[in-house]
Amino acid sequence: MIQEGVLLAPYSTFGIGGEAKYFVDAKTVEELQDALKFARENELGIYILGKGSNSIFDDRGFNGLVIHNNLTNFEQNGDQFIVGAGYSFAYLGIRTAKLGYSGLEFASGIPGSVGGAVFMNAGAAGSEVKDVLKRVTYLSHDGEIKEVEAADLAFRYRSSSFHDGIGVIVSAQFDLVPSTEAKAIQGKHLRYRMETQPLKAKSCGCMFRNPEGESAGRLIEKSGLKGFGVGGVSVSDIHANFLVNQGDGTRSDVEEAISHIRKVVKAKMGCDLKLEVRFVPYELKTALMP
């Protein structure tokens, strides 16, 4: 059902964002197809939202249709797992490890959806989605169901062919490997993330991409920026590559903080930091994202 004037802040792990002109919580493929049709018929810009862990909305909201991709189906066939785009990627890592399968232990603690993880080629601890992904089912712009092999998705660091707007991710198939050690490895990954990252705070995860051979967090910390803040947003005292919303942060606070961090790191460390998160504009003609 299409809703109007839905506040987006609760749908973002950063807790920032105004109202969406239109909003739909799509729990089935048919609801996704209907939402896309509504957008086409009304010439609306579209933003596809998963867990909101990598999306920073405008303080004014979004002047179009936000589709909350909430497909959470889970199917196991031997060592093959077919999972809906709206399924928690972190919980998928936990669940598959408990079932005795290795390959997604690194997903533990990554606060996004399966669709978002595929879209961004999410990774941690030396592993990435592309390492275990077999194929993806998605909807084209006109709502047609299609499949694409992982090998054809042009995966790169935190990027995939879905960045080119080929469609809306419906589900992903992961091919895993039986392992008696998976649960222990998954637990180790999760404990490490809990000790070194502000997982309980309102944030978008890592704000900047790691430069080749370097850590963005380390560069920011060496630049003396741990604890630096603008308005209601500050650099985490736990991990310097995390910006944390202290409760009343705004999009403009985030933008000002990012600008300052980039400027200081460039001056002190000689490095140009590139964003890993996505800023969602208020106006869009068309956009297909997880």
Image (cartoon, rainbow, N blue to C red):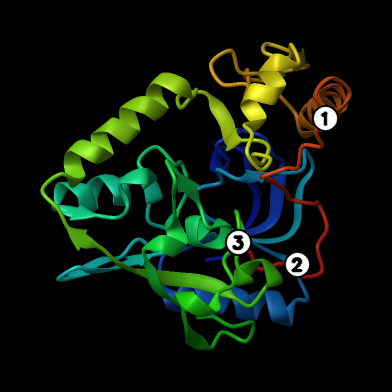
Q: Nearer the viewer, mark 3 or mark 2?
A: 3
Q: Earlier in the sequence, mark 3 or mark 2?
A: 2
Check disc 3 and report its element: helix, strand or loop: loop
Q: Nearer the viewer, mark 3 or mark 1?
A: 3
Name the quadrant of the C terminus: bottom right
Q: Position of residue 205 (x, y in %)?
A: 56, 35
User: For residue 224, what is the image quadrant?
Assistant: top right
Which residue occupies 66% across, 68% down?
288
Q: Position of residue 102 (x, y in %)?
A: 23, 54
* Nearer to me, 131 or 282: 131
Q: Earlier in the sequence, mark 3 or mark 1?
A: 3
Check disc 3: other Cα within 10 Å, few if <14, some if 14-19, many if 20+.
Answer: few
Q: Nearer the viewer, mark 2 or mark 1?
A: 1
Q: Identify residue for label 2.
A: 45
| Mark 2 → mark 1, Cα distance in angstroms | 30 Å
Q: Identify residue for label 1.
A: 262
Q: Position of residue 2 (x, y in %)?
A: 58, 65
| Mark 3 → mark 2, Cα distance in angstroms | 26 Å
